Image (spheres, rainbow, N blue to C red):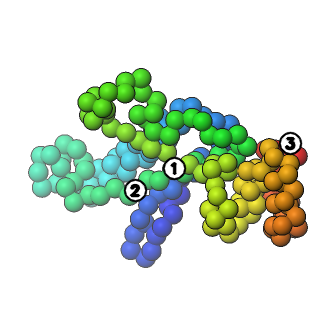
């Protein structure tokens, strides 16, 4: 976890990155747990800060929870970067994992959706939005199962003419090239 956006006044969000080389079929639960633990830590830290300042709050509710009406949480965004060459076929939400599909029940069930980057799902335009070697790695992975498409990419994309060593190691490790 890292603070992803901050200025001289405050931090605005906390970013977590999950690197996956294999599909994880319970990823919504895993990411949801990490995110909720981060929110719980923020609530705990707010209470600790109030206690250290000998501030008991204006109401019994603030005193009991340790989290005051004026306190706010920083958003937590977890991004799953899947480095596999296969399509992601795992659930993307908690509800996708549920046995019950009755909308009357699901209407009362909180959901959690993962934020996923999967090479097989990225269009050329989406790949071009990456400005680092990650673009080259993801593009290679995307085409690694189709030799014809891979050859076209290797010869037409200048980024493949001088692949940095670290990117080449990642590509070789993931695709066994």
Q: Where is residue 104 in the image (x, y as percent from the top left)?
A: 26, 30
Task: Look at the numbered discs 2 and 1 and tell me whether their residues touch, using CB distance below 8 Å.
Answer: no
Chain-order first, disc 1 or disc 3: 1
What residue would you read off at disc 3?
A: 176
What residue would you read off at disc 1?
A: 115
Q: 10 Å neighbourhood of mark 3: few (<14), some, or many (≥20)?
A: few
Q: 10 Å neighbourhood of mark 2: few (<14), some, or many (≥20)?
A: some
Which residue is at the front of the view, 44 or 28? 28
Q: Is residue 153 left or right of residue 64?
A: right
Q: 10 Å neighbourhood of mark 1: few (<14), some, or many (≥20)?
A: some
Residue at figure coordinates x 28%, y 28% from the top left = 105
Q: In this view, does 88 lie to the left or right of 162?
A: left
Q: Residue 75 — which label?
A: 2
Separation of marks 3 and 2 at Cα, in angstroms? 38 Å
Which residue is at the front of the view, 63 or 19? 19
Q: In this view, does 8 lie to the left or right of 135?
A: left
Residue at figure coordinates x 70%, y 66% from the top left = 132
């Amino acid at each position: 976890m890292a603070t992803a956006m901050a200025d001289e006044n405050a931090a605005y969000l906390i970013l977590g990155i999950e690197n996956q080389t294999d599909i994880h079929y319970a990823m919504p639960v895993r990411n949801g747990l990490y995110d909720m633990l981060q929110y719980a830590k923020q609530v705990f830290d707010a209470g600790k800060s109030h206690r250290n300042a000998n501030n008991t709050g204006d109401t019994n509710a603030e005193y009991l929870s340790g989290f005051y009406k004026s306190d706010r949480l920083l958003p937590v965004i977890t991004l799953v970067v899947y480095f596999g060459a296969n399509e992601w076929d795992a659930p993307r939400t908690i509800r996708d994992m549920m046995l019950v599909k009755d909308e009357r029940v699901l209407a009362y069930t909180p959901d959690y959706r993962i934020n996923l980057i999967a090479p097989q799902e990225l269009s050329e335009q989406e790949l071009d939005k990456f400005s680092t070697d990650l673009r080259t790695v993801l593009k290679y992975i995307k085409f690694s199962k189709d030799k014809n498409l891979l050859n076209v990419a290797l010869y037409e994309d200048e980024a493949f003419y001088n692949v940095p060593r670290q990117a080449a190691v990642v590509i070789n490790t993931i695709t066994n090239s």
